[in-house]
Image (cartoon, grey):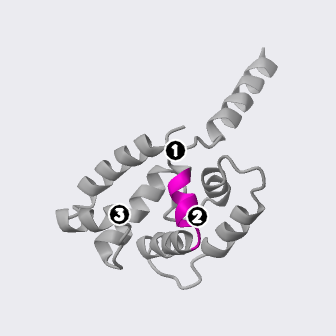
Amino acid sequence: MKASIAILIALFALVSAEYKLRNQEDLMKARKECMEAKKVSPELIEKYKKFDFPDDEVTRCYIECIFEKFQLFDPKDGFKNENLITQLGHGKENKDEVKADVEKCADKNEQKTDSCAWAFRGFKCFISKNLPLVMESLKKN
């Protein structure tokens, strides 16, 4: 009986630890929640729609919020590289290039900046190298 319970707990932990791919619908929901939580102005929202992300506190914290909701970043521990590789590499046979780019962009915050600046720095790096890949990874599954 105890062994069965232990096996069930282990299976539950394994299943709950698996990353769930996010799509456009998930992004729209996260955007709405983060815009409200971070009090993003209508002017900034218009910029974001054009992939124009100014380096200001509201934008940095908005990006951190999106990354957290997508389970790609944790304010204390930083980037979740395996989740990033899974999300950005979705549909690719060879994920080595994606992995290399993630490892370049997902720093360990050697600069000791706040978590919003940390997440934003990685985000800017990802989109500078892989904007089409970022956009492709969010298409409806």
Please provide the residue range marked out in magenta.
129-136
User: In the rendered structure, does residue 132 fall within the stretch colored magenta?
Assistant: yes
For label 3, the crowd category at 10 Å Cα-Cα, with few meaning under 14, some 14 to 19 and many 20 or more, is many
Residue 119: image location, x then y, percent = 48, 69
Disc 3 element: helix
Q: CA distance from mark 1 to mark 2?
A: 16 Å
Residue 22: image location, x then y, percent = 52, 44
Looking at the image, which residue sits at the far top?
1
Disc 1 element: loop
Q: Residue at x 58, y 64 (%)?
A: 79
Q: CA distance from mark 2 to mark 3?
A: 16 Å
Q: Are marks 2 and 3 in contact (CB under 8 Å)?
A: no
Residue 33: image location, x then y, percent = 31, 49
The residue tagged 1 is 22
Mark 2 or mark 3: name the one nearer the start of the chain.
Answer: 3
**Quarter assignment of residue 4:** top right
Q: Which mark is residue 62?
A: 3
Mark 1 or mark 2: name the one nearer the start of the chain.
Answer: 1
Q: Residue at x 69, y 62 (%)?
A: 98
Q: Which mark is residue 79?
A: 2
82 or 132, nearer to the observer: 132
138 or 9, nearer to the observer: 138
51 or 59, nearer to the observer: 51
For label 2, the crowd category at 10 Å Cα-Cα, with few meaning under 14, some 14 to 19 and many 20 or more, is many
Residue 71: image location, x then y, percent = 53, 51
Q: Residue at x 33, y 70 (%)?
A: 59
Disc 2 element: strand
Q: Quadrant of the N terminus?
A: top right
